[in-house]
Image (cartoon, grey):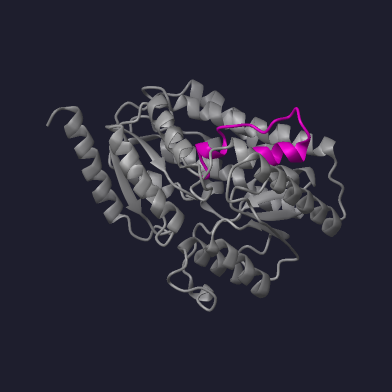
Amino acid sequence: MNAQFKSTILQDFRKTAANPVNVSLQEWKKSGRKIIGCMYHYIPEEIITAAGMLPYRMKAVGSKGTELSESCFTQINCGFVRHLFDSGVRGELGFIDGLVSVNNCDHIRRFYENWQKKIKTPYMHFMPFPKKSGREQAEVYRKELADFKNSLEKHFNVQITDTKLKKAIELHNETRRLQRELYELRKKKNPPITGADVHAVMVASSSMPKEKYNTMLTGLLEELYTGEGISDYSERIMVVGGELDDPKFIEVIESQGCLVVADSLGYGYRAIAEDVDTDIEPLTALAEYHVLKRPACPRIFGTTFNRNDFVRHIAEEFKVDGVISVRLPLCDEWSFEQVNLIGYLKKHGIPHLTLDIDYILSSTGQIKTRSQAFLETISGTKHGR
């Protein structure tokens, strides 16, 4: 690509996203403060921040295998949980002082149970998350959040006041606002940053203090506003999927000449499209945000039409030429979602490619081949070939 954007801030984001442990985590631990691991994005990180601790989204980037997880998991279990559990057994995630999980799927539920038995992190908490999106479900989840808050206070001997919660919500809202500003730059005909680098910035936010992250992202945005735009790309692509935490996948797609300019990902736009309400009681606001406001993932029953509309809206707003949906093998939720998207996007004339990828990208040849063929098909259609 013709805009080889050089930035020390961006390099730091890339390093943070590429490793389970980073300088920010090490500095946090050296200061004697606690780190709480979070399984999946339905856990309100603001509560952890309000407790004076660092929320850390669990990931196993760089994992070399799953051998030490095989006594607890089989080959029909999700690669994400197998790699993550292997990393835990090896002690590579020993820096966390607690682990919080929700019942997102059977794989994650089993992961939590095995972690509890085998690794025994000092603090562990499990929260049932509603299967439907509605006012009653938000009220139920608010009670779960109150239990979580009380559990943190009791175990770590801290006090989480409404004032602290509101301050944490404002901090995380600022993070989301800055990230949306980054996404706005991708709407340009010649965006100043690649999709892989945007994803690195997004993933980095889940493993460093928000104050530091916001300062760095503010600096990066200032650089991008004066940076050269990327013009030598073929098609504008949107990526749809779940907990994709490795920017390398998007890098592989972009190596075929396209530019990923939009997404609907767990680490991407779905996580930042909305803010938490600061005008109502904090726990109620957090519950309503996760159950009612933020774009849902396929796990939430009855949200298919809203998800479809969200994908179509983003595709139109960012002027994409095609959509690539990606899932990890053995993920039932995203298997059904891909089938749903095939029909919906075809109906609306949006080219679509489905890909299955391993959690750790050991081989990229098939991804490159299929992406290249997809891009050629789009180009041929656009030019009447």
**Is 136 situated above or below 88?**
above
Residue 328 drawn at (x, y percent): 42, 57
Q: Is residue 303 left or right of residue 24?
A: left
Q: Residue furthest left?
A: 385
In this orientation, which residue lies closer to the viewer: 17 or 235? Answer: 235
* Place of residue 262 in the rendered image (x, y in percent of width and height, measured from the top left): 42, 34
- Relative to 70, say whether 136 is above or below: above
Q: Nearer the viewer, residue 129 or 68?
A: 129
Look at the image and say whether residue 366 sits in the magenta stretch: no
Q: Does residue 268 show up magenta in the picture? A: yes
Total numbered labels placed on residues in the image: 0
- Judged left or right of residue 151, residue 106 is left
- Percent x, y of residue 380: 17, 33
The spot of residue 67 in percent (x, y) is 48, 75
Work out which quarter of the rendered image holds the C terminus and state it.
top left
Q: Quadrant of residue 212?
A: top right
Give the extent of the magenta segment: 266-288
At 28% from the left and 55% from the top, the residue drawn is 365
Q: Which residue is at a point 32% across and 37% down the rendered structure image?
A: 345
**Can residue 254 be seen in this snapshot?**
no
Q: Is residue 201 above or below residue 328?
A: above
Which quadrant of the rendered structure holds the N terminus? top left
Residue, far bottom = 71
Q: Quadrant of residue 314?
A: top left
Res. 302 in view = yes
Q: What's the residue at 71%, 48% (across, down)?
A: 140
Is residue 147 positioned above or below 10 on the image?
below
Identified at 60% across, 35% down, the residue is 293
